[in-house]
Image (spheres, rainbow, N blue to C red):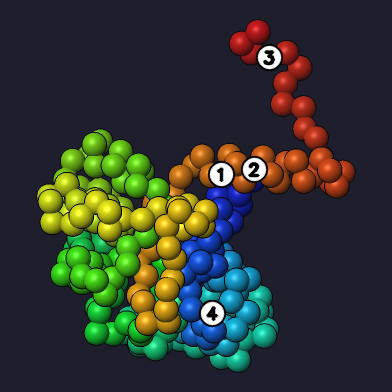
Amino acid sequence: MSANLLSAYRTGAVPGVGVKHLAVEDAEVVGIIGPGVMSRTILGSAMSQRPSIKEVKVKGRSQASTQKAVDWIKNEFPQLEEVRIVETEEEAIRDSDILIAGTSTSSDGPSGFPYFKKECLKPGALLLMPAAARLDDDFVRSDDCNLVVDYTGLYEEWFNENGPDVTYERLLGIPGNRWWDMKEEGTLPAEKLVNIGDIASGKAPGRQNDEEIFCYSIGGMPVEDVAWATDVYDNALTKGIGTKLNLWDVPLLK
């Protein structure tokens, strides 16, 4: 099994759980900032959970790669009524029910990250952020912003390894790292950070109305790749597909 392919689809599936539990039921518009492989698999999972999606807006860094992404989306999801390139991040953000941040970090630090300004967010929007993104701290602290993470322990470990500000500002740019920095600073209550697993299992509430804005940070955990690979492997055995490869005749550590 290709580890890259497994990881790509896992990366799409974890935000898809967020779409299942947190997106408005009749979501129609998706905005993508950074249309790479990660954003494509996330879009696929979003489409599987919200077949009501009709329109996708795409903002990329280069014309060629952005057009390539648009062509791929049109071919992969012919049921969409409109797939179009937009010139600015704000165009991608405004009026979108689901937003996907798929850009890498910037040499300029957070000032160069895609900026999701509260005033531009549609009521009821779901932000899927497995990559660099910037939100105003005041918005993050407010009752208008519901914070969800894939697992709080992941951000705690990053903080313990790298210290304050480093993981978000210089390494990954994933918003959950900034939220954990704020939690350690004492400027964000720990209970504001909710694990997606607790929502999926019913331990924590998900969406209560169509006006709530949810910001979902996905850091990515390789242990999920292992679990997913096990499912794929078991499925292959059950269906009798695939080719068994002999990796050794005698184990090297025997």
**Position of 46 relative to 38 (above/below):** below
Task: In the rendered structure, find residue 229 and report the number of the disc placed on it.
Answer: 2
The N terminus, quarter of image:
top right
Alpha carbon distance from label 1 to label 2: 6 Å
Closer to the observer: label 2 or label 4?
A: 4
Residue 143, given in percent of the width and then of the height, sits at: 24, 71
Q: Residue furthest top?
A: 254
Q: Which residue is mark 3?
A: 251
Give 221 or 199, whichever is nearer the viewer: 199
The residue positioned 18% from the left and 41% from the top of the image is 163
Q: Earlier in the sequence, mark 2 or mark 4?
A: 4
Is residue 102 at all visible to an observer of this figure?
A: no
Q: Which residue is mark 1?
A: 225
The residue positioned 36% from the left and 56% from the top of the image is 194
The residue type indicated by label 2 comes to: Ala
Q: Which residue is mark 4?
A: 25
- Mark 2–mark 4 CB contact (< 8 Å): no
- Mark 1–mark 2 CB contact (< 8 Å): yes
Alpha carbon distance from label 2 to label 3: 23 Å
Closer to the observer: label 3 or label 4?
A: 4
Q: Earlier in the sequence, mark 3 or mark 1?
A: 1
Q: Which quadrant would residue 72 be assigned to in this image?
A: bottom right
Closer to the observer: label 1 or label 4?
A: 4
Q: Earlier in the sequence, mark 3 or mark 4?
A: 4
Q: Which quadrant would residue 88 be assigned to in this image?
A: bottom left
From the viewer's perspective, is 223 left or right of 165? right
Quick one: label 1, few (<14), some, or many (20+) residues within 10 Å?
A: many
